[in-house]
Structures are given as C-alpha cells and as structure tokens.
C-alpha cells in the first residue's frame, strides 16, 4: 500500500519524536546502548522525511547517510555539526548493536541526546518552511 507523500512525511517525523522520547527513557534507565540506537533512529527518521520531501526514498541506511551528507551537509543547507552527529550516531549505533562488550561514556551519550533533539528540530524547521532542495545532477532512476 502506498501513502500520500505528506502523510508519510508526517509519520516519519512522528517516529523521530517517538524515538527521542524512547531515548530519554533509556537514558533514565542508564541503558546507553539502546539510547544510542533510539537517537540514531530519531535522526534517521527525520532525514528520511527530508529526503522524501525532496522526492527521494532510499532503502539502505548507508545510502541515506551518503545522500544526506552530499546534498544537505556539504551544500550548507543543514549545518555541518549535524552531519558529524549523524555520522557518529550511525557508527556508534552499529557498534552498540553488534559489538560484544561495547561501552561508552554516558556523558557523551547525554550530549548526543541534546544534539539529537536539536537535529530533529532543525530538520522539522526546514520541512515547515517548505524548503525543497534542488537536487542538481542526480538522476531519480
């Protein structure tokens, strides 16, 4: 079943906000690995909504990350600090989910919580302004 684009964008933003709430709960319980997972997915859902607004939907996380960096970070549409955050969350989400004996300083994760909330807010602001990124030479085929 396919959904109207605007409905799907709203749904993905709702998932982003839900994942941020879940990250807060996991932090309160000192479940830092799960918190990282939820922070990554909050940002991923927000980025997915942004890409969809621009008529792109990518199925692989690596593709979403690469496209987001090339079309929104490098171009300055989204501040570079959020590109760094997204890349870190991508890396540490994989490590925390799949590596045995993974540990991380909770203070780092606490900072990522704040930064991830700002990240999602910035993406929502871009979407609310109805800013549609003009994708240069990239083919949709």
Image (spheres, grey):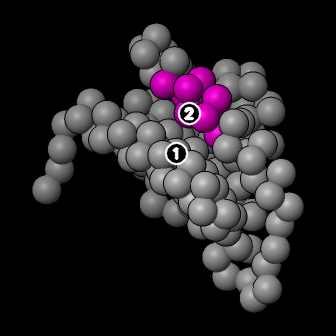
Real-space Cα separation, disc 1 to disc 2, in angstroms: 9 Å
Task: State yes or no: discs 1 and 2 in contact (Cβ < 8 Å).
Answer: yes
Q: Position of residue 110 (x, y in %)?
A: 74, 47
Q: Position of residue 10 (x, y in %)?
A: 31, 34
Main SS of the magenta part reads: helix
Residue at horizontal 27 percent and vertical 30 percent from the top: 6
Q: Which residue is mark 1?
A: 20
* 98, 126: nearer the viewer: 98
Q: Position of residue 46 (x, y in %)?
A: 50, 39
Q: Which mark is residue 120?
A: 2
Label 2 neighbour load within 10 Å: few <14, some 14-19, many 20+: many
Element type at mark 2: helix
Q: Position of residue 5 (x, y in %)?
A: 26, 35
Residue 122 falls within the magenta-colored stretch: yes
Residue at horizontal 86 percent and vertical 61 percent from the top: 105
Residue 137 falls within the magenta-colored stretch: no
Q: Quadrant of residue 30?
A: bottom right
* 125, 30: nearer the viewer: 30
Residue 97 in the figure: left or right of residue 88: left
Q: Assign the N terminus to one quadrant of the image.
A: bottom left
Residue at horizontal 75 percent and vertical 53 percent from the top: 109
Q: Residue furthest front?
A: 29
Magenta span = 116-124
Residue 41 in the figure: left or right of residue 105: left
Label 1 neighbour load within 10 Å: few <14, some 14-19, many 20+: many
Element type at mark 1: helix
Q: Which mark is residue 36?
A: none
Q: Is residue 84 above or below residue 102?
A: above
Q: Is residue 55 above or below residue 38?
A: above
* 109, 62: nearer the viewer: 109
């Amino acid at each position: 079943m396919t959904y109207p684009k605007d409905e799907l964008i709203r749904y993905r933003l709702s998932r982003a906000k839900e994942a941020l709430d879940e990250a807060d709960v996991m932090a309160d319980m000192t479940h830092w690995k799960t918190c990282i997972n939820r922070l990554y997915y909050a940002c991923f859902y927000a980025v997915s909504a942004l890409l969809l607004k621009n008529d792109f939907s990518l199925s692989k996380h690596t593709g979403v990350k690469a496209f987001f960096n090339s079309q929104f970070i490098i171009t300055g549409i989204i501040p570079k600090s959020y590109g760094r955050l997204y890349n870190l969350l991508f890396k540490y989400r994989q490590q925390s989910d799949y590596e045995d004996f993974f540990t991380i300083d909770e203070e780092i994760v606490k900072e990522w919580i704040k930064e991830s909330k700002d990240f999602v807010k910035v993406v929502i602001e871009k979407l609310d302004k109805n800013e549609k990124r003009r994708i240069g030479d990239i083919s949709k085929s």
